Amino acid sequence: MSGQVALDENGQLVGADDFAAQARQALRNLANVLKRLGATWGDVVRFNWYLVDTSELPILRQIRDEFILPALDGRPAPASTLIQVAGLFRPDCLIEVDAVVAIP
């Protein structure tokens, strides 16, 4: 799945200057794509995370776990790579996430 940022269904940024709000929206966007594919978080085999500021990593881990761990039923979390970037396609975006999904 291609990268998701914190834009809502109307293309408006959710959580300007609020990393936690942006991370939640980006994951909600991924969840919506998964649902349309007939997949779940348990079908994700890899994440790629792009952060403007890696000091936000503890917050990201907490939010990631809120979304993903309940769907794993004790299975290991998917592999992931985290990259600090100088900026994303819009200067007000703080996070982008993409995923590789093995559709059942």
Image (cartoon, rainbow, N blue to C red):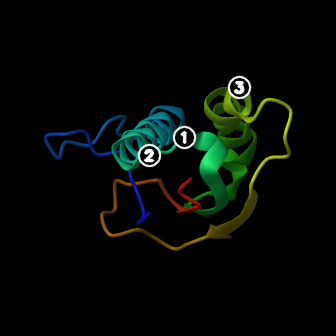
Q: Residue furthest bottom?
A: 86
Q: Secondary structure at mark 3?
A: helix
The vertical placement of 47 against 34, above or below, is below
Which of the two labelled residues, at mark 1 and mark 2, occupies the earlier sequence position?
2
| Real-space Cα separation, disc 3 to disc 1, in angstroms | 11 Å
The vertical placement of 45 against 65, above or below, is below
Image coordinates of residue 87 in percent, x first then y, are 45, 70
The residue to which callout 2 is attached is 34
Q: Secondary structure at mark 2?
A: helix
Q: Amino acid at mark 2?
A: Leu
Horizontal arrangement in the rendering, residue 42 relative to residue 6 (left or right): right
Q: Amino acid at mark 3?
A: Pro
Label 2 environment density (alpha carbons within 10 Å; few <14, some 14–19, many ≥20): some
Horizontal arrangement in the rendering, residue 2 relative to residue 90 (left or right): right
Horizontal arrangement in the rendering, residue 43 relative to residue 28 (left or right): right
Q: Amino acid at mark 1?
A: Thr
